Image (cartoon, rainbow, N blue to C red):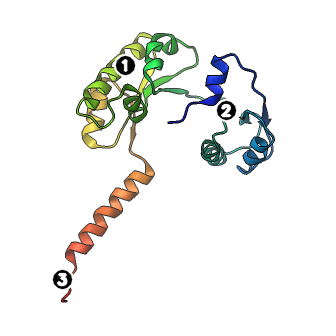
Amino acid sequence: MNENAYRARAERGEVQIGTWVTMIRTPAVLTLLRAAGLDFVRVEMEHSSFSMETVADMATLARALDFPMVVRPPEGVHVTIMLESKRAFERLDEIASVPGIDALTLGPTDLAQDLGVLGTSSQREALDEYRRRLVAAAVKHGKAVAMITDSVEGVRQMIAVGATIINYGSDAGVLRSTYASVVEEIRRAQPARSA
């Protein structure tokens, strides 16, 4: 994963020049702003008509351009903070105590990668430990717990650990696996072709 240049420059105390995007709703504007020499762009959602879909498209392009994008979200009835690094967990209690945060979750893939356990036999155990720490901080500070999983067994596990908000899979993942199952079944049912 690429370094977050915006964060890195801020931590080094470097001056960064950016601009608000408030009216131009096409992601292509990012190429113009980056070519102009800006260091970042800030997308205004609170006082504009940007949709989540447009902002998502802009974020995808911003990442491809390696052009930091900050988003000012509209005021919302529920804010969930996702912790994805060991460093975030070093400040877990401080993060969990912030007023206005309603729920805590962790990003399992990014966290596993940051911990150096992604794809190893110790991945599950390491993530379970971080889930327990997150739940304890959430309970201590009166926050809800949200968790991500992609299996029915995982849903049961997340409920058992204390999650009350479960994000099951994704539209793309469910569609892909469902179609893959159907295609496999159809192909098995076809008569063998003679040579």
SS at badge 2: strand
Q: Distance between the residues labelled 3 and 2?
A: 56 Å
Q: How crowded is mark 3: few (under 14 residues within 10 Å), some or many (20 or more)?
A: few
- Separation (CA) of disc 1 from disc 3: 54 Å
Q: Which of marks 2 and 1 is in front?
A: 2
Left or right of 144 on screen, residue 30: right
**Residue 188 in view in this figure:** yes
Residue at image x 47%, y 18%? 87
Mark toward the start of the polypeptide (3 vs 2): 2
Instruction: Give the x, y percent position of residue 80.
Output: 51, 27
Q: How crowded is mark 2: few (under 14 residues within 10 Å), some or many (20 or more)?
A: some
Q: Mark 1 points at which residue?
A: 135
Q: Nearer the viewer, residue 125 or 95?
A: 125
Q: Position of residue 105 (x, y in %)?
A: 43, 27
Amino acid found under the numbered disc labelled 1? Val
Q: Position of residue 163 (x, y in %)?
A: 36, 27
Name which of mark 1 and mark 3 comes first in the sequence: 1
Which residue in the structure is indicated by mark 2?
70
Quadrant position of the C terminus in the picture? bottom left
Identified at 73% across, 45% down, the residue is 30
Q: In which quarter of the image is residue 162?
A: top left
Q: Distance between the residues labelled 2 and 1?
A: 28 Å
